[in-house]
Image (cartoon, helix red, strand yellow):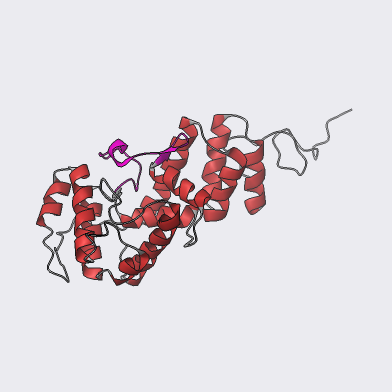
Amino acid sequence: MSENPRQPKAYDVVLGGQNPPPVDGVVLGGIEGVKRRLATAVSVEQQIAAVAEALKYGEVGTKLIFQILNPESEKMEFTLSSLLGQQALAKVQSHLHSDVPLISAVDVNYNDLQKLLASEKWQDADQETASIMLRVCDRQPQGFLDPSDVEKFPCEDLNTIETLWQKYSNGRFGFVVQTHIWQIVGCTSNPDWEAWCRFGKGVGWFSQGAWRYWNDLKFDLSANVGHLPRGGAFIGWGLGDFWTGCRTLSAVAEKLASCKIA
């Protein structure tokens, strides 16, 4: 008996099929198709391809990745953070070829921060950034900023800090890429441990089930996109834990938008 030409083949996308689609195959059905691809991915290559598709759906797709794959292996963590970083970098309009006017609304001198970043002294630059941000808001005794401080932070100073970080890191570091990643993985001002961990994995602060201390960060350009600034050796400019971090990151995202900083 001749083969029925209309009979589905092994890798056709059909409801109820048991074989995962090929790595470069097209999955139909929107987010449901992506969900199925994540659930049926067997090899690492199939998982990576499924993760790339899922991330196109923003927070919904990212949550599916963690719900279905629970990517704890070093290779999957690297892949996930790399893809998140690529998405964030694609949205950044870096000031790479322009002079940076060191403008401050409160007479802060940014020469030292510029010199540190130009010399790729990322660790010292992170400390200097934290110190400046606390000084701008007169919060040195507290050692951190809360969302109300972020809301009142001068746009001129935030733009100077962000532009310096973008320029000297080729767009890899800064608050803009951090907030783009935050918007993909969580973007909630409510305390949310799972969203905070997704963000931590995305920027490389959380790996293999543990949060990295500040001294254990990677202070070079091989670090994850959005890895810096972290906020200095102590609490710094105020990310803290998930109770304060979710609120502060969301406040930073809103402030960047209101200041039209990209």
- The structure residue drawn at horizontal position 24% and vertical position 63%, both measured from the top left corner, is 139
Does residue 237 show up? yes
> Magenta includes 197?
no
Does residue 28 show up? no
- The structure residue drawn at horizontal position 73% and vertical position 32%, both measured from the top left corner, is 10
The prevailing secondary structure element of the residues shown in magenta is loop
Along the viewing direction, whichever of 207 and 141 lies nearer the viewer = 141
- The structure residue drawn at horizontal position 76% and vertical position 44%, both measured from the top left corner, is 15
Along the viewing direction, whichever of 76 and 45 lies nearer the viewer = 76
Q: Quadrant of the N terminus?
A: top right
Residue 181, position as x, y percentages in the image: 42, 52
> Magenta includes 215?
yes
| Residue 201 position (above or below residue 251) | above
Which of the 4 quarters of the picture holds residue 215? top left
| Residue 223 position (above or below residue 189) | above
Residue 222, position as x, y percentages in the image: 30, 37
* Chain part drawn in magenta: 206-228
Along the viewing direction, whichever of 174 and 44 lies nearer the viewer = 174
Q: Is residue 141 left or right of residue 184?
A: left
Which of the 4 quarters of the picture holds residue 104? bottom left
Q: Is residue 72 left or right of residue 90?
A: right
Along the viewing direction, whichever of 224 and 214 lies nearer the viewer = 214
Q: Is residue 53 left or right of residue 9?
A: left
Residue 40, position as x, y percentages in the image: 66, 36
| Residue 225 position (above or below residue 141) | above
Residue 43, position as x, y percentages in the image: 59, 29
Which residue is situated farthest in the front direction here? 141
Q: Quadrant of the C terminus?
A: bottom left
